[in-house]
Image: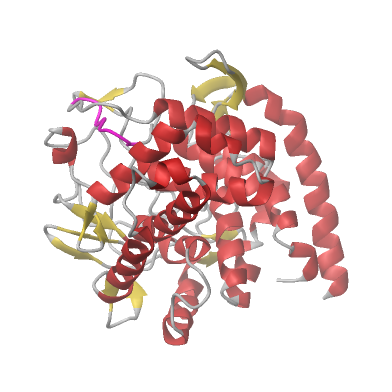
Amino acid sequence: MRCNDDARRDVLVSLAAKAAAVLPQLATAHACKDGRSLHLYRAGLQDGQVRFGLFGRDLLITARLLRNPRFTQDVLYFVAETLGVRTDARSGEEPGRGLHERDRIEMRGRLTRYNALDVTPLFLVTLGEYVDASGDEAILADLDSAIERAIGFMVAHLANGRFVEDPSFAEADGYALRATYWKDSRLPEREDPCYPVAYGLVQAQAVAALRAADGLLGKWQRLAERCPGNLATLATDALDELTRHMWDRKHNLPLIALDGCGRIEGVSSDMLHMLDFLEPGDLDAAKLVAIARAARSLVTPYGIRSFAPGQTDYDSHSYHLGAVWPFEQAIIFRGARAHGLTTVCEAALGVIQALEAEGFPELVYWDGGVLEGARAVPEQGCDLQLWTLAVPSALLAAGVAEGA
C-alpha cells in the first residue's frame, strides 16, 4: 500500500505542476467598484478559446479545493460584489443571491445570470473556512453588507427547515436553466422542476452555510447585531429536514430533489458530494453504509459517475446524468474520507488515471470501453476547465499519500 501511495503522490505532484503551468490561460482581471483589482480565472476553454467566463460557483469551488489564501480572497470579493441587490424576473436576481455567470447568456427568453441557488451558501461556507484558516477577520468589515444580504437570502429561502428554490422570489415564473444547482442541465424525470423545489445536495450545503454564518457572527459583532441570532438552530432544523423528509427511507438514501410533483429518488453522486458539507456524526452509521453500498453502481475506472446506469434518463455521455466530472472526485474523496468511507475514497482516486490520459477537461465519458474526454462531445464540455485544474493539489492536501 505504501508503494502505491508513493506512486500516486508522484503522479499528483507532476499533475499539480502541469496544472499550475496552464492555469494562466484562464486568467483575467476584474476591477471592483471600490477600486480593488482582482485576479480571477475563467471557467473553461475549448480549443484555446474562452467558452465559459466568470462563474461564481466555479470560482468558489476552486477556491475550496485549492485553499490558496490570495486566490480565495479575490474570489470572495468578486462574489460579494456581485451578490444580487434587487429583484429581476428575467435574470433571476434577488437580494443576496449569488451570481451564476457574469456574461450575458440568454436561454428560453431569460438570462442565466442569477440562475444558481447554491452560490450563496457556497460563499458563506468558503468565507467561513477562509477566515478560520487565515485569521483574516478584517475581510468581515469589508464584506459586511454582502454577508448580511447572503444571510438574509438563506433565511428567506428556508421553509420549516427546507432550503427551497422558487422563481417567485425573483417575481418570475421560471428560470433560463432547468435546474439551479451545479447539475444545471436538468433533473432526472423532469424537464423543469415543479416549483418550489429543494435539492438534496444544496440542502446539505445550506446546513454548512448556516453553521458558517453562525461562526462569522461570533467574530463580527456589528454584523451580529443586524442578523438573526438563531442560525445554529436553523442549521439543526435544516439537517433534520434533510435526514427525515428529504430521505428515501426504502433505500436509506438522500433524495436528489423534492418538488411540487413529488420525490426525485435515485443513485446520484450528489449523495457523496454532500458529505463534504456535513460533519461526522450528522448521518448515522446505517445511512453511511447505505450510501457506500449504493455508490458501487457509480464506480468507473476513472472516478465516480454523476448518475448510475439503469436509471431513467441515464446516458454515459449525458452532461449531468452519466458523465464523470473530475472536480467532483476531489470533493467526494474529502467527504468520504471525513466520514470513513474508504471504498468510496479509493473509487474517487480513479480520476488520477483520467487526468493522466486526458489532461484537465471539464468531464470525461466511459461506457465500458475506451475513456473519452470532453472532445468526444464538444458541444458539451471544455477541454480545459478551471476546477479540474484544482484536483491534483486538492487530493494531495486531502492526504492521498497517506492512503485512501
Task: Examine the rendering and report whether any part of residue 59 can be seen.
Answer: no
> Is 338 or 123 nearer to us in this picture?
123
Q: In which quadrant of the rendered view does residue 173 lie?
A: top left
Quarter occupied by the N terminus: bottom right
Above or below: residue 329 compared with residue 279: above
Q: Which span is picked out in magenta?
A: 90-97
Where residue 186 appears, as percent x and y from the top left, is: 29, 47
Asked whether, in this view, residue 216 is left or right of residue 399, the answer is: left
Q: Which residue sits at x=72%, y=29%?
A: 22
Q: Which residue sits at x=23%, y=72%?
A: 245
Magenta stretch contains residue 92: yes
Quarter occupied by the C terminus: bottom right
What secondary structure prevails in the magenta region? loop
Where residue 302 appears, as percent x and y from the top left, is: 61, 58
Magenta stretch contains residue 250: no
Asked whether, in this view, residue 185 is left or right of residue 285, the answer is: left
Q: Which residue sits at x=29%, y=43%?
A: 153
Where residue 212 appears, as percent x and y from the top left, is: 47, 54
Where residue 11 appears, as percent x and y from the top left, is: 81, 53
> Is 74 or 1 nearer to us in this picture?
74
Above or below: residue 321 compared with residue 379: below
Q: In which quadrant of the rendered view does residue 309 lie?
A: bottom left
Which color scheme did the rendering employ for the protein?
A: secondary structure
